[in-house]
Image (cartoon, rainbow, N blue to C red):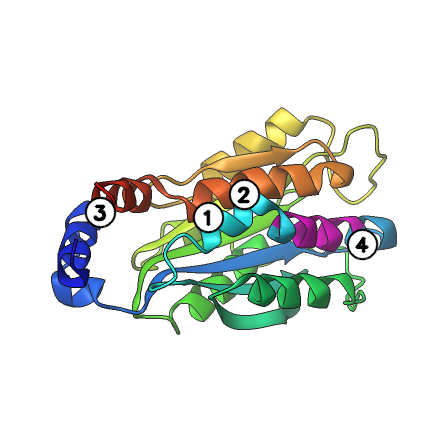
Amino acid sequence: MTGRGLIALIAFALGLSVSAAQAQCRQALALGVDVSGSVDGREYRLQLDGVASALRDPDVRRAFLAMPQVPVRLLVYEWAGQGQQRILAGWQAIENADDLDRIAQRLETTTSLYDDPATAIGTAMLHGAELLARQPDCWQKTLDISGDGPANRGPHPRDIADADLGDITINALVIGPNSRANTTKDLSNVKTLEAYFQAHVIRGRGAFVETAQDFDDVARAMRRKLLREVASPALSDAGRAAGR
């Protein structure tokens, strides 16, 4: 199939105009990592190392690199209370394995900055949406919010999810407490936390919640979530059809 034919096929699969499908980015993916006060030093390290491990997974790499002519652009930021957001790895077009390695290495060497019991999920969602708005030429825009508890500061997440954020999809990674004691958040039931993120955080086409049982489980859960996000059904269908 010619390049023009592939563009037309993908445009049809995603419901895009051909001019929109000619963009040089198939997906802008922003990962927002919860580093609020309930996340101690060990958990901070497990979370960032878990994301790095997922980025090095062979299947995840294949998904990122499946369409090199229209790469995924990836950004990672951390968030805590209101006004506490920090970009850990800026927008990077993932064109080869080295690009993923550089982001993974950056996460593995990052140290904690915030120590605030506030958890401003709504503000973190707004921040992620603003970052994604800077990538207008991507076919899909996905915000990936992790969290180990409900919001206790800032705008309510549901108000943000219901706002006019354009075509942004928001997915969530819920991190359960396992047997961990936590004095800043009620995390006694991971199913309750899943339901909270289902009801108030996720939005958009195909939005979903992935669950890590605890911080030790982040690498596995992030791997599953990235595979589901990057290898989205519409893109996969278009790619399979193009190969016939």
Q: Secondary structure at mark 4?
A: helix
Real-space Cα distance between discs 2 and 3? 21 Å
Name the amino acid, label 4.
Arg
Where does the magenta region start and end? Answer: 46-54
Which residue is at 64% across, 52% downward?
A: 56
Q: Secondary structure at mark 2?
A: helix
Residue drawn at point x = 58 percent, y = 46 percent: 58
The answer, for residue 151, to whether it is visible in the render is no
- Mark 3 secondary-structure assignment: helix
Q: Label 2 sits on what residue type?
A: Asp
The numbered mark, 2 or 3, whose residue comes first in the sequence reads: 2
Give the image location of residue 76, x and y in percent: 59, 63
CB under 8 Å between discs 1 and 4: no
Magenta-colored stretch includes residue 52: yes
Amino acid carrying mark 3 in the image: Ala
Instruction: Assign a secondary structure to mark 1.
Output: helix
Label pair 2/1, CB-CB below 8 angstroms: yes
N-terminal of the pair, mark 1 or mark 4, is 4
Image quarter (top left, top right, bottom left or bottom right) of the C terminus: top left
* Relative image position of residue 243 (x, y in whole percent): 25, 44
Can you tell which of label 3 and label 1 is closer to the viewer? 3
Crowd tier of the residue under label 1, counting other residues whose Cα lies within 10 Å: few below 14, some 14–19, many 20 or above: some
Numbered tag placed on residue 59 in the rendering: 2
For disc 1, the marked residue is: 63
Q: Nearer the viewer, residue 231 or 199?
A: 231
For residue 9, side relative to residue 144 (left or right): left
